[in-house]
Amino acid sequence: MRHSNNLDVLRTCAVMLVFLNHLMCMLRAQHAVIDDGAARFGVILFFVHTSCVLMGSIQSIRAEGDLWVSRFYLRRLFRLYPLSIGLIFVSILLRAPMKPWMGLDHAPYSASTLLSNLLLVQNMTGKTSIIGPLWSLPIEVEMYFVLPLVFLLIRFKSWRRLIMIWLGAALFIAGTQNLAADMLHGAHRFESLEFVPCFLAGAMAFGLARPARPWPSYLWAPSLLALIAIGRHYAFEPLVFWSCCLAVALLYSRIADLPTNLLTRLCHQIANYSYGIYLTHIFGLWIFFQMSGSMLHSVALRITGTVLFTAVASVVLFHLVEDPMIRLGKRLTAGLGASSQPAASPAFASVPGQ
């Protein structure tokens, strides 16, 4: 069982893009037009990373025996929902704003809005996300339903087949998304289609075999930075960010894994707590820029408070909520369709906390 330093760096870049973009939005909320491009591209990189890691998770679960699809779905339920449900109720209790940089407005606390958020289906029902970053989680939930099928398609590691699948999906979505939305009167219901090529790119990253002599590992970070520089400016242009996702997949399959050092250890920790960072930084921004704004006149203190709050909250919630629920999900599904034969150790394991 191993994890990938390159994937840790990718996930760290993703969550830092979201966090830093929202921090910058908070700092300039009164002085400039808000640009969500960097945060959106961070979420797009999350989709690539998640799909790649979950291919490894499915491989591991499949080696345990039959009913692997059911075990996969149940474990994802215990991974994704407990933290989001808990923070939704915290947000309602505190009347926290959905996006602090947009003011103190929050989503209407109606029963239908609450239920949609708790089930992570607000994109299907057209309801507002109670916590701003929750908009991406329904898309992940919908992608979970097709990831086992994607795993079966990519497991043969034929790069020609994978490229053809990706191109076919991209062309089909580009040609039908707007048409379907117009015909069925509900563009929000088809939002997930726009990100299918991103998830497929992540699956390709897992499925493509790395060459015997891969490219030097030092190429990984500058390659990601170059793609981020492009992607953040075109995060609302599907053809461009799809191409960036495909480039990430191809580069991951060709570049050697980074050696373990201080930087990759730091990235591993950030990646491990990234789900908590993604959801809790909104509360930190609200507390230290709006609630404490009259007491903390120093911008440096506000930033420091937000960073410390987010770090502590994400670590505490991981160990109190996320990790226990992950372990519970594994225990509850351990005997479901288990094989009588010992499972072979997979060559790839999911990043801890994913």
Image (cartoon, rainbow, N blue to C red):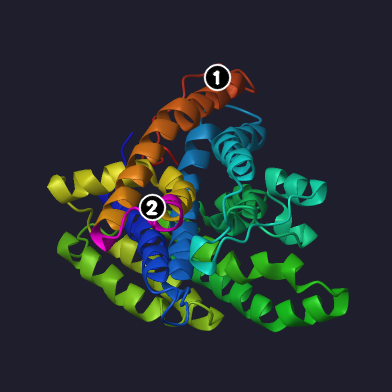
> Residue 254, position in %: x, y?
29, 64
Residue 288 marker: 2
Q: How crowded is mark 2: few (under 14 residues within 10 Å), some or many (20 or more)?
A: many
Q: Give the range drawn in magenta.
A: 287-300
> Residue 187, position in %: x, y?
75, 73
What is the distance, in whole Å, between disc 1 and disc 2 at their CAs? 39 Å
Residue 320 marker: none
Quadrant of image for the N terminus: top left
Quadrant of image for the C terminus: top left
Whether residue 125 is situated above or below residue 268 in the rendered picture? below
Residue 352 in sight here = no
> Residue 297: within the magenta?
yes
Residue 324 in sight here = yes
- Assign a secondary structure to mark 1: helix
Q: How crowded is mark 1: few (under 14 residues within 10 Å), some or many (20 or more)?
A: few
Point out the residue furthest to the left here. Answer: 261
Kind of residue at badge 1: Arg
Q: Which of marks 1 and 2 is nearer the N terminus?
A: 2
